[in-house]
Amino acid sequence: MNLEKINYWELNAKQKEVFNFHQVASFLVEYGFNCIKLADDWQGADFLAYHFSGDETLKVQLKARMSIDKKYLDKDLYITFPILKNWYLIRHDELINIVRNETNWLNTSSWMEKGIYNSAKPSQSVIKALEKFKLEKRSYSL
């Protein structure tokens, strides 16, 4: 077998979603979560993350950039997305509060008319507000 790393940017949209799912799952296992990719969105979730303790299951929407969407409001849904090679996991409605406090996104036509807003490069103040939601890996050997 010849193992060769792939170029993420050459993948199609579905392949990128699978790639990103596995990236996030590799972070969440560090926090005690097993992730199950769903075949289609269920209650807005792309995957479920259930804790090894059995006490918690998260419904998670996977995004390629920081995103908010009115259709996710009040659904107890988490959003995960990358910013500058870091992945973040936050309850969608809590992300709305950060956006409200740190940006003007909720006053844009995109949000008011279409009900969505996203950014690949949020401001430094947003990134700072998201710091406690950044997923981190330990570096260790088995």
Image: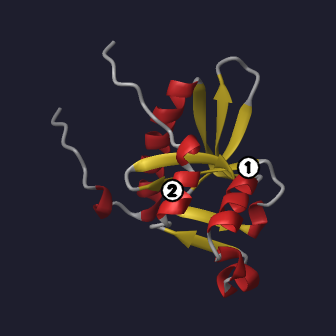
Q: How far apart are marks 2 and 1 (CA)?
A: 20 Å
Quadrant for residue 33, please give it.
top right
Q: In which quarter of the image is residue 140?
A: top left
Residue type, numbered disc 1: Leu
Which residue matches tag 2? 127
The residue that label 1 is drawn on is 77
Residue lying at 67% horizontally and 83% vertically, measured from the top left: 108
The secondary element bearing badge 1 is classed as strand
Horizontally, residue 4 falls left or right of residue 113, namely left
Q: Disc count in the image?
A: 2
Q: Which of marks 2 and 1 is nearer the N terminus?
A: 1
Q: Is residue 87 or residue 23 the one in the foreground?
A: 87
User: Residue 47's quadrant in the figure?
Assistant: top right
Q: Which colour scheme is used?
A: secondary structure
Q: Position of residue 39 (x, y in %)?
A: 62, 49
* Towards the viewer: 10 or 93: 93
Q: Which residue is drawn at 71% across and 75% down?
A: 106
Residue 110, how many percent across, how many down? 66, 82
79 horizontally vs 138: left or right: right
Dot 2 amino acid type? Ile
Q: Which quadrant: the C terminus?
A: top left
Number of residues whose C-alpha sits closer than 10 Å to that of mark 1, classed few (under 14), some (14–19) or many (20 or more): some
- State whether residue 138 is above or below residue 27: above
Residue drawn at (45%, 33%) of the image: 26
Residue 97 seen in this snapshot: yes
Q: Is residue 46 visible?
A: no
| Image: 126 above or below 117 | above
Element type where label 2 sits in the image: helix
Nearer to us in this view, 57 or 31: 31
Looking at the image, residue 119 sits to the left or right of residue 59; the answer is left
Picture residue at 34% right of the left edge, 24% below the top = 139
